[in-house]
Amino acid sequence: MGSRIRLSAAVALVSLITTAATAQVIPPSEQPGRERERFTQPPSPLAQPAGPTVTLPSTVAPKGAGAVFVLVRGVKIRRCTAPNSLRRSTPA
């Protein structure tokens, strides 16, 4: 009976050791022979940016913009996903 326990303990110990050894994965960036690639400068791009320049309109408001009056009479929201506690109880 004692030898069976020792045998099962030995089998369990060997299986744990082999499982731990197979679980160690080295990432591809750390593989042997890749050390030189980590410290080399990548080649500079061959293409040079060119093309027409884009000009944006001015950010200054046009003349008379201060006299414009905008009236918002209402806002409708459909298919709202707000919880019931945040929704209005009566429709507008």
Image (cartoon, rainbow, N blue to C red):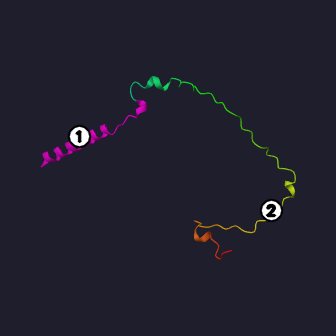
Instruction: Give the residue drawn at x 17%, y 47%.
Output: 5
Q: How far apart are the two marked residues, 2 and 1, measured between alpha carbons? A: 80 Å
Which element type, helix, strand or loop, lies under badge 1?
Answer: helix
Using the image as rendered, state which of residue 75 and residue 40 is in the foreground.
75
Q: Which residue is mark 2?
A: 70
Residue at screen point 67% across, 32% down: 51
In the rendered structure, which amino acid carries the disc numbered 2? Val
Q: How many marks?
A: 2
* Left or right position of 4 against 31: left
Q: Residue 16, located in which quarter of the rendered image?
A: top left
Q: Is residue 67 above or below residue 50?
A: below
Which residue is found at the position 62% from the left and 27% from the top? 48
Looking at the picture, tell me which residue is in the foreground, 60 or 32.
60
Which residue: 87% across, 58% down? Answer: 67
Q: Nearer the viewer, residue 7 or 81?
A: 81
Residue extent of the magenta highlight? 1-30
Residue marked by disc 1: 14
Residue 68 lies in the magenta stretch: no
* Residue 70 shown left or right of residue 80 in the figure: right
Q: Position of residue 39 (x, y in %)?
A: 50, 24
Looking at the picture, how far across and down is residue 33, in whole percent? 40, 24
**Magenta span includes 23:** yes
The answer to whether 11 appears left or right of 56 in the picture is: left
